[in-house]
Amino acid sequence: MTATQPHPAPPLTIPDITGLDTLTAAFEYAKHGWHVGPVRPGTKHPGSILGKQWQSKTTRDPEIIADTWMTHTDAGIFLHVGRSGAIVIDVDTPTRLPDVLTTALTEHPAPFQRTRRSDAARRHYIYAQPAGRTLGNGLGRLPTGWGDLRGANGVIIVAPTTHPDPDGHYAWGRTGPVPQLPNEIAELLANTSTPVDVATDQTIRDFISQHDSGDDLDKLRTLTATYKKTIAAGDSRHQRAVSILAGMLKEAAAGYYPAAQAEQQLREAFLDAVAQPGHGQQGTARTGHAALEEWRGILAWAVAQAAHADPQATMERAQDHAPVDLSTLVDTASAASSNPTSENTTTSQATGSAETAPSSDLDRLLDPTTAAAAASDEPAPSWRPLDLTAILDGTYTRPEPTIMPRTDGPALFYPGKVHTVYGESESGKSWIAQHAAATTVTGGRVLFIDFESDAPDVTGRLTALGTTTEQLLSDAFAYVRPEASPHTFHEADEFAQLLAQQWDLCVLDGVTEALGLDGKSTMDNDEITAWMRDIARRIARTTGAAVILVDHVVKSTEGRGRFPIGGQAKMAAIDGAAFLIEPLTPIGPGLDGTLTVRVTKDRPGAVRAHAGAWRKSDRTQEAARVRLDSTHGDGTTTVTVQPPEYGELQAADPDKPFRPTKVMEKISRILETMREETSLRGLLDLYRDSGSKARRGTVIEAINHLADGGWIVETEGPRRARMFRSANVYRSHSDPDSDDFTGDLATYTTTVSDRYSTVPGNAGGPLPDDRSPGPLTGGPGTERSRGPQTEHSDRVRSPEQTYVNQFTGEIHVGEEDPQW
């Protein structure tokens, strides 16, 4: 099948860069068709910054340009004349300019740049290469002594770069479209006789279009598999791609297979390879614009070599080599990726068709400035002042959450906003997002982007929650399992198609994995902010979806705070609400469990307005209590989103003293494992060795609270050392003074001393009356385990009616339960 003709290269233009700095000017040159490069101040050498092989490192990619000039802020600009498809007449001695040039320059005016302050006639005249020709730097039949030509492999330094000579000055005297070199000059010049270092974009387009025949796809697959096998063995990903692509394109020119298909297959293999951490000679990983720009340089060099190769010599060389068994090139490490029928292989490749890649694919590769403009979703500059009329005229309504309503009406998630739900592993955070999806898909559209699980698990959960097969297979639901950044070349179109649709809910499950795929660090706030703006907020803004990010928390409960794991920017970038998920009872198959959804941030404010009491330890409020009942026996799960347990009537107590209950529980667990008494210093060391990170003062305060409450016993050891042993298990969820208390304060009537006196196995009876609160001091051998009364001491029951589970610390009031 004949390839669709790629679009011609954009016409070259010299833009007006008056008043622009070098970075902005470089953007303008690239946008108008020029491959640009940085040059070190005081020199004209194009490799002064780019180094060796600079010819393949010039660029038109806006992001590469930004990175380059932000790194080298004092760098000048050079135009890669040859790669851009231009030729420059560099006039150094105007008085010796031959008549043919004088006439042509007058009759065919072109953009020009002055290069000297004292002699305005010393200029660079800019023309486009004649169609179908590649002119080098030789003067041909032109006389000498007036200046030079800059064609293939040529460069010129351009404004606003500072000239290295005192009298030098780069300034455009005429800007605008670049005309083709006049025929009267072109006829005096010869095509270059040696391969150019890199081909122009138009040469690449022409080469791909012209060499579109051949069906020896096994040969093509063999070369692709060879690349993957050598890379797996540690060979250089760049150098091996250079040599194999040049060979591929030479064989394409000889008619073995379409050039477009060869370029596409090896490009995909190369981009996949460089995205992985390197080993051996492979260097660091490259993704996104950096990887694509590297490939553009490789392609430009390979086309330049293949265009000057002799097809007959290529065929003779190919015939001298025996056919290679493809299976010998595919090992267990690369079998899946090199299988011609794998999902990374196009349909035409799998079926043996010679159909080439669509022209738009090549156009997007060669013109990154156009691709960047098309990918931009900004309707207007964000620094433009906003019209506040609609906000201040009384018609504006604040955002209200509509996704995942509670049984009493208020919902949790705002349309068009970004939210996060986070918690420990198996806390139920994914259940919350999946329930939101299951309830939304019945009347809306759901986009589920899964970085952590897989399709069978997610669809199984959604089916258990009541979603039908018809709904999951309809246009109302889309499941995506990304394996690469949405900005990689072969993923960008699909991501753009998702953004072009309207969604009611978007779930991104696995924020840590998503950041990694995009080459971002979970600890770098700048990179997190960039990802949130570019992915999460972009989805919300362009599709109208309520975006839910599913994330984890740090393992240490003491150092967890209010935030998900990683940089603080994760929370700062949320413009909807953030929720901490805490299980109260186990959830899972065959269980009827409960978890709380605590709001930790609510920028619009409508969720907190219907939340419960404020928990001072982490400044959160219970926004909902969710019951997940999986006891039906048929694999289904019923989810009930209820109001907070204590509703809006539960008032926070600002005078309640702080108790480090999480640290108290950790200390209790440590002492429960000890058979002998442990000193204060030893207990502090054990706490630190456990990986916990609370401050020393907080740990000592927790120890004192445990001793005061009768959960541990303190004695005085040698040299007045404080010695401790466990007397009772402490769990924060069974402590009425803890924010984690899950009992009913209205019926809780025991005292702290009752807890100690009724622990099974404690024969000591009630504590003596003389153990009143006071400093933890005493004479040698004395035990201190004091138990002040709680605020509910006016409703104390007798000790025999109160029982404490010695394994869980749970409190039971009433008749004795045998299991207690």
Image: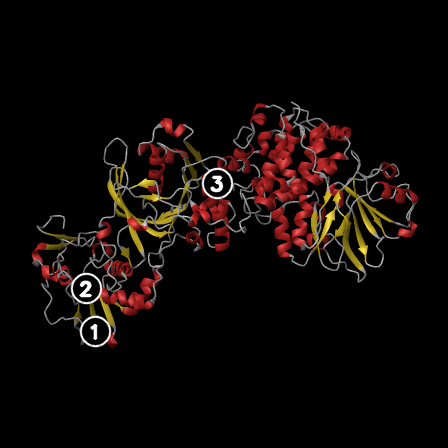
Identified by mark 3, the residue type is Thr
Q: Residue furthest front?
A: 393
Crowding at mark 1 (Cα within 10 Å: few <14, some 14-19, many 20+): few
Counting residues from the start of the chain, the first of labels 3 and 2 encountered is 3
Task: Return the x and y of residue 88 as percentages of the image width and height.
Answer: 80, 45
Q: Which residue is mark 2?
A: 709
Q: Is disc 3 in contact with disc 2, using a CB cutoff of under 8 Å?
A: no
Please state if 584 lies on the left or on the right of 26 as rendered. Answer: left
The quadrant where residue 202 appears? top right
Please state if 623 lies on the left or on the right of 331 as rendered. Answer: left
Residue in front for this viewpoint, 323 or 575: 575
Residue in front for this viewpoint, 810 or 440: 440
Q: Secondary structure at mark 2?
A: helix
Label at residue 716: none
The quadrant where residue 752 appears? bottom left
Residue in front for this viewpoint, 597 or 115: 115
Q: How many marks?
A: 3
In the image, residue 71 above or below residue 234: below
Q: Which residue is mark 3?
A: 542
Q: Which residue is mark 1?
A: 775
